[in-house]
Amino acid sequence: MSFTWSCGNLHQRLDRCLANPQWIASFSHGFMQHIDKIGSDHRPLLLHLNDNVGDVSARPCRFIGAWQDHLQLMGFLESVWQTDLSLQNNINNFQSEVQGWNQDVFGHIDRWKRCVLAQLCGIDKALLRGHSEFLKQLVKELRDELDVVLEQEESL
């Protein structure tokens, strides 16, 4: 038995994959794999839906956790995910579309960070010349935006 969680000398199998007969019939070559734990006390589970896992020529699609914080993610998912398509077709659509979305929309964190920092720097210089409630409020909003950018950058 493979353990999926450990803490000191305590080892447990906490994480499992479950499937009903319809799922098994749809993904008869599917299997679950335990991935090495890195920086966590859990071993993640990877569910392979087909037996094409030996194809190393194609780079695997990975979900980036920082995408969840992006304001446009839900709109992107709604445009890609079709309720009348099968799970596998939706996954394939997502994989082919998310690469472009990641590059064109999400992938400009450095540019976004530089822009926010430049705005903050300019506002700081303007505030040295005189008090402005509008600029102080704008600084607060930009610092909140910078926090989001830094969290996304860190999660990458």
Image (spheres, rainbow, N blue to C red):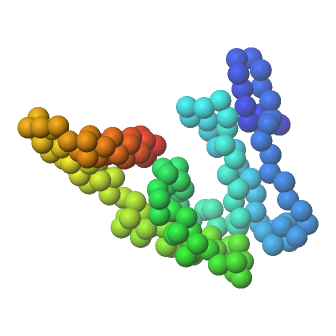
In the figure, residue 5 lies in which quadrant? Answer: top right
**Residue farthest to the right, as pictured:** 21
Residue in front for this viewpoint, 43 or 53: 43
Relative to 44, is 149 on the left or the right? Answer: left
133 vs 55: above or below:
above
- The quadrant in which the N terminus is found is top right
Residue 94 is left or right of residue 17, and the answer is: left
Instruction: Give the x, y percent position of residue 97.
Output: 49, 73
Q: Residue at x 70, y 67 (%)?
A: 50
Position in image of residue 120 (x %, y %):
22, 43
User: Residue reaching furthest top?
Assistant: 9
Q: Nearer the viewer, residue 136 or 109?
A: 136
Residue appearing at x 62%, y 38% in the figure: 36
**Rendered residue at 80%/51% (across/down):** 17
Residue 67 visible from this viewpoint? yes
Residue 108 picture location, percent across and down: 32, 57
Farthest bottom residue? 84
